[in-house]
Image (cartoon, rainbow, N blue to C red):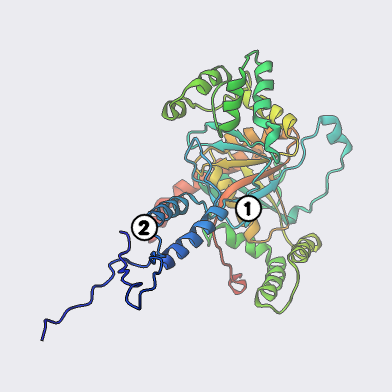
């Protein structure tokens, strides 16, 4: 008798189910994904029981960092072709007598939150390295003598009157700063604020009340 | 890793010529590579939980002329509950601080579960129980209602409420933003119908200083009793 021969097996693995699964998951993630927006500062928001979600469009966001610096962001509104951000920079540039080139306006349209005094914006826009750019951010001045934040909000409201105000403050930022921002916004006829918070669950039992 | 298929078929049966059978399998390895790469990328960049917001509406700023025209709502002093935020603590007292009358007693508490919440719930018991019973019915399915009308109903409860306190929140100079959010959040938890954020008055600053003085004086004794 001849030697027992093992049948030659096909070494390939059938990957079809794996591919099926992967493509399914991939489609799911691609469709549900909403990218985390880039933020200039790390902000630890306080928590609340509110379950209302942040509006996605038409928002003026004000970030308040731990050291009470204020950063600003506005999105392009419902219709991205309206170029809210570029127009905003153009107008505010005219106000402060700074002229921006078309490229600079375009780059500004693509960036997100920022916090710099007006005279540095031009250099900021022309800096290619993102790390260098982040290092430049020192907050928007809002002293009574040079209240640039007020101007930003003013022109932002002009460009997108539907925009809501969202305030993303750090737990440890001072109430004084936040109050100042409330005041500035109220001067510009914004009376409704969305305070960004983390969700926390709180249970109160009715029988516990004395 | 192309598939090896022994294509021996064809000539065994008779002399008929058949076209060589090609493998129908496609090598999927690169595809899987790419997919897993993209999948990982999307999984890591996805922000699933959208941040939540707490909405507050502040009264419109009025000029002095406009202020004169508006009639301020009269509030019964006994209903007023004042909360003063200062140094990570909540100070509270009932009624109005009038310098001509004897000043109300100020008490110190904190933002924990047994702190200011207990005070608020005690004052707002009637409304809280009513609203809690209603929401429990909704949760348990005893009552079926669309979400809008639930919200409307809850708002109506707050509007009709007469017994609950009017809370005045006063934030001092060195208060953290987080504490303000905490206290507004407590209003939401305790279903407080009416509250406002107002400025601190000079009388209250005096009261606060006095309360702080007694608090620091009494802390060593309270430590001893422990």
Quadrant of res B17: bottom left
Instruction: Please give the residue where the numbered disc 2 appears in the rendered image.
Output: B29
- Indicate which disc residue A53 carries: 1
Q: Residue furthest top?
A: A97
Under circle 2, the secondary element is helix
Q: Position of residue B150 (x, y in %)?
A: 75, 66
State which chain disc 2 sits on. Answer: B
Same chain under badges 1 and 2? The reply is: no
Q: Residue furthest right?
A: B69
Quadrant of res A122: top right
In this picture, residue A129 sits left or right of residue B68:
left
State which chain disc 1 sits on. Answer: A
Q: Position of residue A16 (x, y in %)?
A: 42, 66
Figure check: B16 above or below A192: below
Q: Position of residue B88 (x, y in %)?
A: 50, 46
Q: Position of residue B6 (x, y in %)?
A: 30, 69
């Amino acid at each position: 008798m001849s030697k027992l021969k093992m049948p030659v097996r096909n070494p390939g693995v059938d990957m079809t189910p794996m591919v099926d699964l992967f493509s399914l998951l991939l489609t799911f993630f691609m469709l549900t994904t909403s990218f985390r927006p880039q933020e200039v500062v790390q902000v630890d928001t306080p928590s609340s029981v509110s379950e209302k979600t942040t509006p996605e469009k038409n928002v003026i966001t004000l970030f308040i960092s731990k050291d009470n610096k204020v950063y600003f962001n506005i999105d392009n509104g419902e219709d991205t072709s309206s170029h809210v951000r570029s127009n905003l920079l153009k107008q505010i540039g005219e106000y402060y007598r700074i002229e921006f080139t078309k490229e600079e306006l375009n780059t500004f349209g693509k960036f997100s939150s920022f916090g710099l005094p007006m005279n540095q914006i031009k250099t900021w826009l022309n800096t290619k390295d993102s790390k260098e750019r982040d290092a430049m951010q020192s907050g928007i001045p809002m002293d009574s003598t040079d209240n640039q934040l007020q101007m930003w909000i003013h022109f932002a409201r002009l460009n997108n009157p539907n925009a809501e105000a969202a305030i993303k403050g750090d737990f440890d930022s001072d109430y004084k700063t936040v109050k100042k921002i409330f005041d500035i916004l109220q001067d510009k006829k914004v009376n409704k604020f969305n305070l960004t918070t983390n969700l926390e669950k709180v249970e109160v039992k009715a029988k516990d009340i004395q | 890793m192309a598939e090896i298929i022994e294509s021996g078929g064809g000539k065994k049966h008779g002399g008929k010529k058949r076209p060589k059978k090609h493998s129908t399998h496609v090598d999927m390895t690169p595809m899987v590579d790419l997919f897993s790469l993209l999948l990982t990328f999307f999984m890591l960049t996805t922000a699933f939980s959208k941040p939540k917001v707490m909405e507050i509406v502040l009264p419109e700023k009025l000029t002095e002329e406009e202020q004169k025209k508006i009639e301020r709502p009269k509030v019964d002093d006994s209903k007023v509950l004042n909360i003063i935020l200062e140094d990570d603590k909540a100070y509270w007292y009932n009624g109005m601080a009038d310098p001509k009358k004897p000043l109300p007693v100020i008490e110190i508490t904190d933002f924990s579960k047994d702190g200011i919440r207990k005070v608020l719930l005690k004052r707002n018991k009637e409304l809280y129980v009513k609203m809690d019973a209603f929401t429990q019915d909704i949760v348990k399915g005893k009552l079926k209602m669309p979400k809008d009308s639930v919200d409307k109903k809850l708002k109506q409860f707050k509007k009709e409420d007469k017994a609950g306190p009017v809370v005045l929140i006063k934030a001092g100079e060195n208060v953290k933003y987080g504490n303000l959010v905490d206290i507004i959040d407590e209003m939401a938890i305790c279903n407080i119908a009416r509250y406002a954020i107002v400025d601190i008055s000079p009388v209250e600053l005096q009261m606060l200083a006095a309360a702080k003085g007694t608090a620091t004086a009494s802390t060593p004794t309270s430590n001893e009793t422990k």
